[in-house]
Amino acid sequence: MLFDALRGLKEALREKERNIVSKIELSDDRKEVLDYKLHQVKKLDIITVVYFHDQQYLKITGVVSRIDPLARILRIVNTKIEFDDIYDIDGDKLQE
């Protein structure tokens, strides 16, 4: 095994390359549209979600494995997303 003289350098460079952004405050109209879409989401639907996590916006497409309106959590496969962090939802079965 090679000696890594600059231990942590790769991770530091990766972190520096990441775009850090502030969370966007959604308008009331946008919140209503997202709420309407969330009410249409069912377990096993395939959807795409754009959400805020760790100072960046991420996009994930996958199968809904759980939706919990009381805990306000959506799970796509193994990714847990809080409703308040969702920026957009799209899917074949969802209407605007």
Image (cartoon, grey):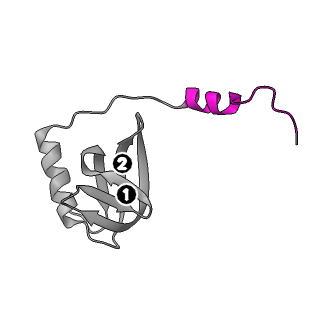
> Which quadrant of the figure has residue 53?
top left
Q: What residue type is labelled 1?
A: Thr
The image shows residue 50 at horizontal and vertical percentages of 36, 48
Per the image, is 80 magenta?
no
Quadrant location of the C terminus? Answer: bottom left
> Which quadrant of the figure has residue 37?
bottom left
Above or below: residue 96 compared with residue 86? below
- Magenta residues, start to end: 2-17
The residue at which mark 2 appears reads as 50
Residue found at x 11% / y 40%: 28
Above or below: residue 85 compared with residue 56? below
The image shows residue 34 at horizontal and vertical percentages of 20, 52
Per the image, is 12 magenta?
yes
> Which quadrant of the figure has residue 55?
top left
- Nearer to us in this view, 34 or 94: 34
Quadrant location of the N terminus? Answer: top right
Residue found at x 35% / y 73%: 44
The residue at which mark 1 appears reads as 48
The residue tagged with tag 1: helix, strand or loop? strand
Q: What residue type is labelled 2?
A: Val
Residue found at x 35% / y 46%: 51
Residue 65 seen in this snapshot? yes
